[in-house]
Amino acid sequence: MNRHMMTEFAQCLRRARAELHRTVAQTDEELATLEEHQPGASGEDVATKVVTAVLSRLQGQGKHELDEIDAAQTRLAAGTYGICEGCGMPIPLTRLRALPVARSCMPCQLEHER
Ligand SMILES: [Zn+2]
């Protein structure tokens, strides 16, 4: 995966995250705090508390989606994004474009679900 593709997927994940933020934020202030907060930022500051409180409203599918986006962003940062967790081969771009948070290629996914 080249730098250009990494940028494309990084933007895609940020957009998906922003959409989830909009579903849980009740005020512009909350939304701004969510947008500014960087995933993985350390510390017990006020922003972290607000983010934790707001995101706790996410339930079920939304929570799962955010976790998957988090995990995908972590893989991007670690340089393992787009590598199948099952077989270690690159995940086809068509699959990543359809599902940017995909952890595995289609055959491994199907194998996993069986
Ligand atoms: Zn695979």
Image (spheres, rainbow, N blue to C red):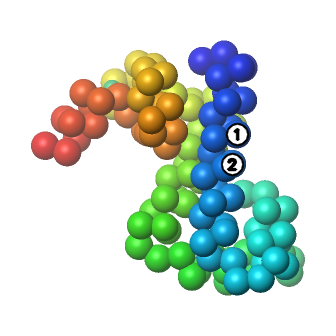
Q: Is residue 39 visible?
A: yes
Residue drawn at (84%, 79%) of the image = 29
Query: Quarter-wise, where is residue 4 in the image?
Result: top right
Position of 74 relative to 63 (above/below): above
Give the secondary structure at mark 2: helix
Q: Position of residue 92 (x, y in %)?
A: 43, 21
Q: Quadrant of the N terminus?
A: top right
User: What's the residue type where badge 2 is placed?
Assistant: Arg
Q: What label does residue 21 carry, if any?
A: none
Q: Which residue is mark 1?
A: 11
Res 10 → quadrant? top right
Q: Position of residue 47 (x, y in %)?
A: 83, 75
> How many numbered circles does the render carry?
2
- Disc 1, SS: helix
For image coordinates 19% across by 45% down, the residue present is 113
Which amino acid, by three-letter code, is at mark 1? Gln
Residue 36 placement (x, y as % from top left): 84, 62
96 relative to 53 in the view: left or right = left
Side of 39 where 114 appears, left or right: left
Please state the horizontal and vertical placement of residue 25, each as a whole percent of the image.
Answer: 69, 77
Measured Cα–Cα span from mark 1 to mark 2: 5 Å
* Residue 89 placement, left or right of 63: left
Q: Is residue 48 visible?
A: no
- Crowd around label 1: few <14 · some 14–19 · many ≥20 (10 Å): few
| Numbered badge on residue 14 | 2
User: Are discs 1 and 2 less than 8 Å apart at CB?
Assistant: yes
